Image (spheres, rainbow, N blue to C red):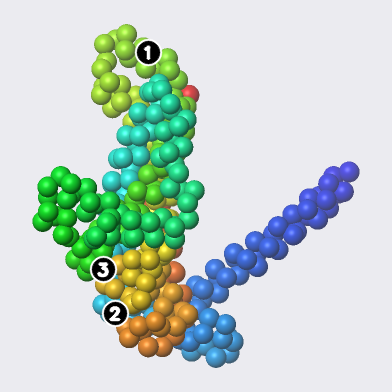
Amino acid sequence: MKTKNKAMIVIFLAPAVFLYAMVFLYPTIRTVIMSFFKVEGVTDAVSSWKFNGLGNFRTLFKTPLFVSAMQNIGLIWLVGGIGVMLISLLFGVILTSGVHGKSFFRSVIYLPNVISAVAMGTMWINYVYNPDFGLVNSTLRSLGFSKAAATQWTGPEMVFWSMLVAYCFGMVGYHMLIWMSGIERIPVDFYEAATIEGANVFQRFSRITLPLLKGVCRTNIVLWTVSTMAFFVWSQLFSPVNLSESTVTPMSYMYELVFGASNSAVTVRDSGAGAAIGVILTIVVVVVFLFTQLIVRHDDVEL
């Protein structure tokens, strides 16, 4: 009977293991190996690869456009991350405090995650940041701030921050739900006991809610890092023609290297360097994950 069970387990697992190896494991290994070779096309035969050692990585970090891409993604991760985490946590706390219409507000805040990034980006560019009839400039003009209303929000000086605000707007709802799932696991008895002892709202938040959200905080940081490293669509939307130092990210730069140039900044395809970018981003995610594990040594208090 045990032998038959093992055979059945193998039969049922084999298709999943095969698909995992072909769709995920093989491309991952091939990409890591490719990052150490000079490769023009991603589908080139292995026999045409030329060993380059760490040359691809050295070339990338000597390229001003890639350095700008790493700086941009760092700002998105840090500045955007702080803003998204604080606002999403605030919404999570408010919506779990017994406010009326919780389901409605939760759906409204999460709605941008249901809409595709292309549609959201187009809306922000054409209807929010438009200099003539956009929501931002129209509101500023109605309030009498005519000088601020003349700002070109998608111009070279402001395009990065405009893109960052638009991206963070869509990410708040996603992380809010994660915060809410953690807050709702905290027994109400804890808050009732603290209230009886005379604790105010801020004391209950700092001494009960936050300490019991350590694991949720770690999860949010890791998920934010993964989504930030994959930042691509918004960069393409805010700079659709040429790669711009203001909006370029590692993923958009990798796309140009691997699939061909759309501007004068990249003249040849270099899949080896593109693979090296993928390896660098993976290392960043792993480092952030290990750092969060080190900072948050213990998970949530067991309830």
**Residue at the image position 33 percent from the left and 43 percent from the top:** 85
Q: Amino acid at mark 3?
A: Ser
220 or 84: nearer the eye?
84
Q: Residues within 10 Å of mark 1 (few under 14, many from 20)?
A: few
Regarding residue 192, the answer to whether it shows in the image is yes
Residue 48: percent from the left, percent from the top?
Answer: 55, 91
291 or 88: nearer the eye?
88
Badge 2 marks a residue whose secondary structure is loop
Badge 1 marks a residue whose secondary structure is helix
Q: What whole-number distance in Å separates the C-alpha atoms at marks 1 and 2? A: 58 Å
**Quadrant in which residue 130 is drawn:** bottom left
Q: What whole-number distance in Å separates the C-alpha atoms at marks 1 and 3? A: 50 Å
Query: What residue is pinned by disc 3?
Result: 246
Badge 3 marks a residue whose secondary structure is loop
56 or 140: nearer the eye?
140
Query: What residue is pinned by disc 2?
Result: 63
**Residue at the image position 33 percent from the left and 70 percent from the top:** 239
Vertical order, 271 against 247 (above or below): below
Q: Amino acid at mark 1?
A: Glu
Tag 3 or tag 1, which sits nearer the N-term?
Answer: 1
Q: Residues within 10 Å of mark 2 (few under 14, many from 20)?
A: few
Query: What residue is pinned by disc 1?
Result: 192
- Single out the mark in the foreground, 1 or 3: 3
